[in-house]
Image (cartoon, rainbow, N blue to C red):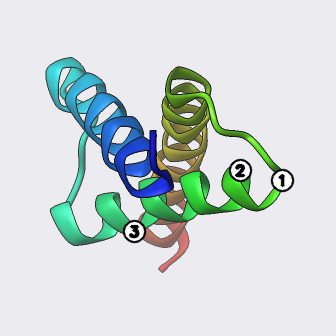
Amino acid sequence: MSIRCTVESAFFIAWSALEKSGELGPPDESANVILDAIEAQLRLGERRQLMLANRAIDVYRAHAAQSRTRHDCEARFG
């Protein structure tokens, strides 16, 4: 399987899982976070679709949690 197909499949898996769980945020930002996470893993040699997708989901969730925390702090102290 080509790298392009691997990336597309991993992205679709991650996107679908986050969408079904209701965690998906703004589409552009969400897509960038997921793709950046997949790309970083590819640079390290990972090629398994499910591993790419699962790690991208973890990165996305950490990003979303950090964004919520930052937003909450700004709301309280802003």
**Residue type for callout 2:** Gln
User: Mark 1 belongs to which amino acid?
Assistant: Leu
Coordinates of residue 40 in the picture (x, y in percent) = 70, 60
**Residue at point 41%, 37% (across, down):** 10
Callout 3, which amino acid?
Asn
**Rendered residue at 80%/48% (across/down):** 45
Q: Which mark is residue 41?
A: 2
Against 64, is 20 above or below?
above
- Callout 3: few (<14), some (14-19), or many (20+) C-alpha neighbours within 10 Å? few
Q: How many marks?
A: 3
Residue 60, percent from left and from top: 49, 45
SS for tag 2? helix
* Residue at which label 1 appears: 44
Q: Is 2 on the left or on the right of 43, as rendered?
A: left
Q: CA distance from mark 1 to mark 3?
A: 18 Å
Pointer 3 residue: 32
Considering depth in this image, is 41 or 68 the residue closer to the camera? 41
Discs 2, 1 touching: Cβ within 8 Å:
yes
Q: Quadrant of residue 51?
A: top right
